[in-house]
Every structure is written in C-alpha cells, then in structure tokens.
Image (cartoon, helix red, strand yellow):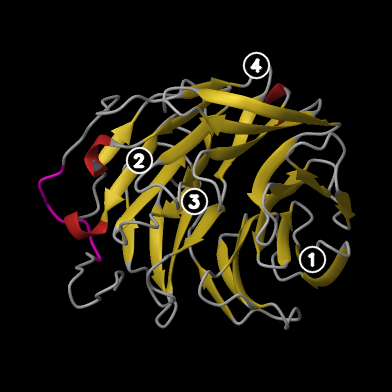
C-alpha cells in the first residue's frame, strides 16, 4: 500500500468502475511557458533548493544530430513568465539533467557522446566532464555526493563527481538502460529499467549482480520512480503505454496498472505532496495524472504539447506544481486543476 498511513489509502489492483474527472487544457492559475527555439526538450528539473529555478536539457534535430543546449531558467516574481538566466552549448545532444545533491546551482547533463557534463549557473565553461560510457547517456540522477548515469551501452555507472571517478559499473541489462534512479529512502540502493523489459534493484556496493529482478513490462521500460512516502514502492512506465506499480516485498505481480496513454510513456513520477498521485508524460503529446485512491483511470489529461512530451518534474518546494517539456520546444510550468 502507498501512503503515509497505509491502512487509510486504498490502491486497486485492477481497474474498477469509478467516477473519474477529466480536465483538458483548463487551469485555475496562469501557466508560464518558455520556448527553446531550434531545440527539442528532453528533460526538465526543478531546483531542490530554490522553488523558482529550473534546468532544461535539449537537443537539436530531435536528438538525431547536432548539438545540445542546457537552459537555466527562473520563474518571474509575478509567476506569469519564465525567464532565461543562461544557456550553455554542448557539441552533442543533451538527454537528461539533474541538480546536484550537495551544491546549490550545480547541475549535470547526460550527452549523446557518452559524457556527463557538470555545469554551475553563471559559469560559461563546464566544471568537469565525466567520461566512461561508450554510447549515449540518457539518464542521470544525483543524490548527495554520488551520481548515477544510465546509457545505451547497457550499463549504469556510479560516480564521485567531485573527483571525476567512476566508482562502479553495473552491467546486468541486455539492452540500453533508459533510467537509473536512487532510492530517496536508502542512498545505497537504486533501480534501473531497460529496453529488455526488466526492472532491476541494485546495491551501490554490489555491482556484480542485482538484488532483485522483475519482468516489469512486455515491452521496453522507459522510466521508473520511487514513491516518496513508501520505501518499498516503485512505479515503472513502458512503451506499451502502461504505468505499473511494484511492491518490492512481493514482486510476483504489479500492485496496480494505470491505463489511458495511447503511446509510450516516457516518464513517470510520484507526487512528493500527495502520496497517491502519479503523473506521467507520453508520446501521445499528453501529461496525465492518476489518483490511486480513485482507481486506474486518469484523473486529468492535459494536452498542451503538439509533439512527443518527454520531460516531467514535480516542484518539491511548491505544492502540486509541475513542469513538462517536449519536442515542440515548449516548457510549461503549471498546477493541474484537479490538484488545486
């Protein structure tokens, strides 16, 4: 069960008939938007220390060729505008971004050339460049002093970014690894998902084999996220258009399966403010929300992109605020009507 009070929160294991509310393109507050001209959005992240700061990783030509740009952005005091603080260019596409777990204003990006580039707001040159992967880095996660990177070379690497040292390489997947994510409850544990359809759990100190493995989808698994309230709960998202929840104590079958997306689900995230709420973005150009207490149908479907929606993040410092970005070069910051 998910939630601060497991006895209180009900999670269905199958979709049930329920009264489902849909809101499409309707908001109770303004929605600031930022355009990344000539760059297609892959990842957006709110700062962990400043509620109005964001970073957006983008690529030219839909990531197939050309360079990449990292945008450092800020929401204006009036809340109606997103301002560009700085943009930083790289020679290859940028496919994910994460803020430092220890230093304010520092972020790392995964690149198509296999590097992880660490930048600081206000500095034109990278602080450091981490090199060890042999192919595109499509996921980065930074918790405290350690950084994870996942790559098309089928590996996950654990880094000490300060010393630019690769501490361990985890090679348990048979296809590209789309996402690797630290547990927020146990810094020595992380999860990875891959084109091989598997979710794997790892100890940072044991690279030779995963602690647990589950066939999560009969398709590529593109994203995973840990519940912020329950240490044993994870969600996965696949190219089959499904979002599934997993109880790590019983991996024989998913806790729930959320439907509604018409194409691949690129990212999934549990809300840090409402334990039963899950958000996801899809190649069907939508951002969707579910409330697990209300069943498996979407609580809200938001259609404000005209291309694949790739990036998604909750603002941990501002309740229920979301950001998303897509291949239409748009970054939206908004609070869904269903959560107001």
Q: Position of residue 205 (x, y in %)?
A: 73, 82
Placement of 320 over or under 231, stated as above or below: above
Dominant secondary structure, magenta? loop
Q: Report how far apart the C-alphas of labels 1 and 4 lie in the structure.
A: 33 Å
Question: Which residue is denoted by mark 2 in the rendering?
Answer: 288
Badge 4 density bin: few <14, some 14–19, many ≥20, Cα 10 Å: few
Q: Secondary structure at mark 3?
A: strand
Question: Which residue is denoted by mark 4 in the rendering?
Answer: 37
User: Which mark sits nearer the N-terminus, 3 or 4?
Assistant: 4
User: Which mark sits nearer the N-terminus, 2 or 1?
Assistant: 1
Q: Position of residue 321 (x, y in %)?
A: 39, 42
Badge 2 density bin: few <14, some 14–19, many ≥20, Cα 10 Å: many
Badge 3 density bin: few <14, some 14–19, many ≥20, Cα 10 Å: many
The answer to which of 133 and 75 lies nearer the viewer is 75
Please say if the residues under marks 2 and 1 sit with CB atoms less than 8 Å apart.
no
The answer to which of 107 and 289 lies nearer the viewer is 107
Please say if the residues under marks 3 and 4 sit with CB atoms less than 8 Å apart.
no
Front position among marks 1 and 3: 1
Placement of 126 over or under 231, stated as above or below: above
- Residue range in magenta is 13-20
User: Which mark sits nearer the N-terminus, 1 or 3?
Assistant: 1
Q: Report how far apart the C-alphas of labels 2 and 3 lie in the structure.
A: 14 Å
Q: Report how far apart the C-alphas of labels 2 and 4 lie in the structure.
A: 25 Å
Question: Which residue is denoted by mark 3 in the rendering?
Answer: 238
């Amino acid at each position: 069960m998910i939630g601060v009070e497991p006895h209180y929160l009900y999670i269905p294991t199958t979709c049930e008939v329920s009264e489902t509310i849909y809101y499409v393109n309707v908001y109770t507050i303004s929605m600031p938007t930022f355009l990344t001209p000539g760059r297609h959005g892959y990842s957006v992240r709110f700062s962990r220390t400043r509620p109005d700061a964001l970073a957006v990783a983008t690529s030219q030509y839909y990531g197939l060729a050309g360079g990449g740009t990292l945008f450092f952005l800020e929401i204006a005091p009036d809340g109606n505008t997103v301002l560009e603080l700085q943009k930083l260019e790289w020679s290859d596409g940028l496919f994910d971004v994460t803020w430092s777990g220890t230093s304010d204003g520092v972020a790392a990006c995964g690149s198509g050339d296999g590097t992880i580039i660490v930048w600081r707001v206000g500095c034109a040159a990278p602080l450091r460049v981490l090199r060890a992967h042999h192919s595109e880095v499509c996921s980065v996660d930074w918790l405290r002093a350690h950084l994870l990177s996942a790559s098309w070379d089928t590996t996950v690497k654990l880094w000490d970014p300060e010393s630019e040292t690769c501490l361990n390489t985890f090679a348990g997947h048979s296809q590209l690894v789309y996402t690797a994510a630290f547990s927020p409850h146990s810094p020595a544990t992380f999860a990875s998902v891959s084109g091989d359809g598997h979710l794997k759990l790892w100890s940072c100190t044991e690279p030779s084999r995963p602690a647990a493995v589950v066939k999560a989808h009969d398709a590529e698994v593109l994203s995973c996220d840990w519940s912020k309230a329950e240490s044993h709960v994870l969600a996965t998202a696949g190219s089959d258009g499904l979002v599934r929840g997993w109880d790590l104590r019983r991996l024989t079958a998913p806790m729930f399966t959320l439907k509604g997306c018409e194409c691949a689900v690129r990212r999934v995230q549990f809300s840090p403010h409402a334990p039963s709420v899950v958000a996801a973005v899809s190649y069907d150009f939508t951002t969707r929300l579910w409330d697990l207490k209300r069943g498996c149908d979407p609580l809200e479907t938001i259609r404000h992109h005209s291309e694949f929606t790739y990036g998604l993040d909750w603002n941990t410092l501002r309740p229920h605020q979301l950001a998303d970005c897509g291949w239409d070069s748009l970054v939206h910051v908004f609070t869904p009507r269903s959560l107001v």
